[in-house]
Amino acid sequence: MSNKSQLMVSKVERIRNIVPKKEILLRDRTFRKIYDIKKPLSCVSSEVQLMLYVITNSKEIKILRNYPYLFAVEYLVQPPYSQFGKGDLIFTNGKNHFLIVELKYLTKNTGRTAQTSRCKHRRKVEKQALHYGRCFKRRYPECTIAALAITNQNLKHKYYQHIKI
């Protein structure tokens, strides 16, 4: 076997073994057991409750059906440094495809100022999702990364596919 083919094989093995399937299944089972709280969307009144809603109803949200396993909850974006932010959720399909999910609870107040504030926060969560996706891609360049920003307003979301560094 030539050196080039050995390099190709070792690279494929490295990509395949970034996170073993066994660990993904264990993480998913553990997180879902901890965060299994059934509430309707109308009862959601904070970002934590929105996160619980998304975790328990992930099979009903169309985009999340492609990423059936919950990989991380409330993770540091650039460990061990907390000053770079804390992401909300990471889902995976078990084949090196990851979905970075950022959540934001928007107030239901009415009026011009409240509308402006909601719009500003919606844009902020979209930027955060992209930023966290790029940070994850830097750590794991072999993986395919997508990002999703979700708000509580009828689960409105913005989806970014195949994030590049």
Image: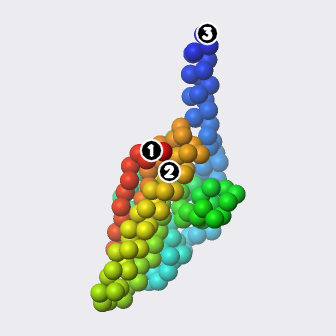
Q: Secondary structure at mark 1?
A: loop
Q: Compute the Cα span from label 1 to label 3.
A: 33 Å
Residue that label 1 marks: 164
Q: Secondary structure at mark 2?
A: helix
The numbered dot on residue 6 is none
Residue 43, given in percent of the width and then of the height, sits at: 44, 83
* Disc 2 and disc 1 in contact, CB within 8 angstroms: yes
State left or right for residue 64 relative to residue 17: left
Q: Is tag 2's residue or tag 1's residue first in the polypeptide sequence? A: 2
Where, by quadrant of the figure, is residue 34 drawn? bottom right
Q: Compute the Cα span from label 3 to label 2.
A: 36 Å
Q: Is tag 3's residue or tag 2's residue first in the polypeptide sequence? A: 3
* Disc 3 and disc 2 in contact, CB within 8 angstroms: no
Q: Nearer the viewer, mark 3 or mark 2?
A: 2
- Is 101 drawn above or below residue 21 in the view shown? below
The numbered dot on residue 134 is 2
Residue 143, given in percent of the width and then of the height, sits at: 52, 41
Residue 29, given in percent of the width and then of the height, sits at: 61, 58
Q: Compute the Cα span from label 2 to label 1.
A: 7 Å
Residue 87, given in percent of the width and then of the height, sits at: 55, 63
Rendered residue at 38%/68% (across/down): 123
User: Disc 3 marks which amino acid?
Assistant: Met
Q: Is tag 1's residue or tag 3's residue first in the polypeptide sequence? A: 3
Q: Nearer the viewer, mark 1 or mark 3?
A: 1
Toward the left, the furthest residue is 112
User: Disc 1 marks which amino acid?
Assistant: Lys
Residue that label 3 marks: 1
State left or right for residue 104 relative to residue 113: right
Rendered residue at 60%/21% (across/down): 7
- Crowdedness of circle 1 by 10 Å Cα count: few (<14), some, many (20+)? some
